[in-house]
Image (spheres, coloured by chain):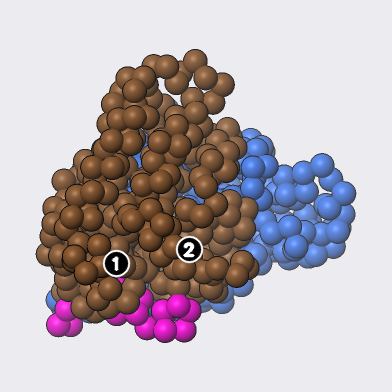
Chain colours: A brown, B blue
Amino acid sequence: MSETTFRQKLTAASVRNESLLCVGLDPVVERLPAAMLTQTDPVLRFCSEIIEATSDLVCAYKPNFAFFGALGESGWRTLEATLEQIPPHIPVILDAKVGDIGNTAQQYARMFFERLGADALTVNPYMGYDAVEPFLAYGDCGVFLLCLTSNPGSADFQTLRVDDEMLYHSVARRAVAWDQDSGNCGLVVGATKAETLMEVRQLAPQLPLLVPGVGTQGGDLEAVIANGQDAAGGGLVINASRSIMYASSDADFGSAARSAAATMRGDINNLRQPATA
Amino acid sequence: MSETTFRQKLTAASVRNESLLCVGLDPVVERLPAAMLTQTDPVLRFCSEIIEATSDLVCAYKPNFAFFGALGESGWRTLEATLEQIPPHIPVILDAKVGDIGNTAQQYARMFFERLGADALTVNPYMGYDAVEPFLAYGDCGVFLLCLTSNPGSADFQTLRVDDEMLYHSVARRAVAWDQDSGNCGLVVGATKAETLMEVRQLAPQLPLLVPGVGTQGGDLEAVIANGQDAAGGGLVINASRSIMYASSDADFGSAARSAAATMRGDINNLRQPATA
């Protein structure tokens, strides 16, 4: 356990870089610029350039485990090496959406928090408290529970009516309760459902919200910020992956990513409350 | 795509070995017999012996990805090498409980079905259809959706009342609907809630049910079979992990695992309907 918690590290990075922008790292070999393909480890080289081009513009990076796992055995090394490229003051939110019974969850915690050194992890809440608790037990790490996701299928279960609310409201309430003991809970709320961000913010006034879906998926940035920011004008981690990583498919992809990230950071900051921008 | 579907392979293995027993592979270094620790790859050696000792007694193996991932970089090789030890006629249900938006789910499908060659995968349904569809698209592979899990936390969300049923009923209904197109859906229903197996079986008469929780977790085998079997006296994949793998912590762990597996297989077969046993 380090002396700094995930939330402190996130706030410090956010203040230092004046940013609520998180860049997702979802590398797909087929989409890499041609110049990368001659490198020893094309995915590592690509991610390294994206990180180098954006690390003064972001509050966090969010590598998605699936994209590295899909590379097979070499993917683990590539992920580890990619994480080493991230400056130590920028928190890493590992996106793996895990969730399993306690003794298995402990193994995932070991994998992601200990072996890979992630600062935070996304966790699927469907299996309930004892599937989440082993992650919450790492008090210095962050645990983002899926609440209302950005995809169309979120309507299949997450918005079902349970008693007098929707399922994702129940998840938000539970997360707030669990956070009272652990202090390290957050929620994932998709930007494509920006109007619902206000409801989640009301249920969870103090929890950090990880908001995917503002880039390629088309979420409305203005509504995200108006509805999702906390009382201090923060509490948001706004993620964009493809719109930044693949801003250009040519050799200028690094500067294109920087430009896309700078634009989004600026747009976000212009929309934040003046008092706290 | 091979010419044999997961369901066909499962049925063939179940008939050949007269078994509904699935052995879970959840290796933890701290629990390995001392004799294993001097081996080059203790986890591989251990799993290989468990497989060798039980492969004529099971209908499937269920390696849990977390336990290999927790080993770090070497875990991938160990998992691959473990899978190679499983006879090709025994299906592998990879337990990873993944679930993410479509373009990410495609990467998990690539990782587990293509890179690792799993015959089936466990998938968390919380994100809805488009998070499941990329797995269903591998028609020859199996997709076990978490329905009602074996842990205490399953009461936090899975049994919440939605309209006039519970959330896990909704999951079962959706799985049946999705299966009509794909033909490769199954459900995970914990043995610790054996009375609910009858409800799920009524909602999903034809879907294979993966039932964890009969060993260490204490589920009632008799109720599992009475309530969970399909019209043909099958349709169940009854998993035990720790009660078999760690049946002995000494050098005789292989024969102890064989004995535990044979006992459980026999108990299951004695409880099946005579007409179909």
Q: Is residue A273 left or right of residue A245?
A: left
Write down the region rendered in magenta.
Answer: A163-183
Amino acid type, callout 1: Gly
Q: Is residue A45 above or below residue A236?
A: above
Q: Residue at x 19, y 50 (%)?
A: A267
Q: Tell me which chain the residue with mark 2 is part of.
A: A
**Residue underneath mark 1:** A234
Q: Who is closer to the viewer here, B270 or A191? A: A191
Q: Secondary structure at mark 1?
A: loop
Q: Who is closer to the viewer here, A187 or B110? A: A187
Q: Residue at x 67, y 56 (%)?
A: B27
Q: Residue at x 58, y 65 (%)?
A: A106
Q: Is residue A216 left or right of residue A96?
A: left
Checking the image for residue A9, the label placed there is 2
Q: Is residue A181 above or below residue A238?
A: below
Measure the alpha-carbon separation of dots 2 and 1. Answer: 14 Å
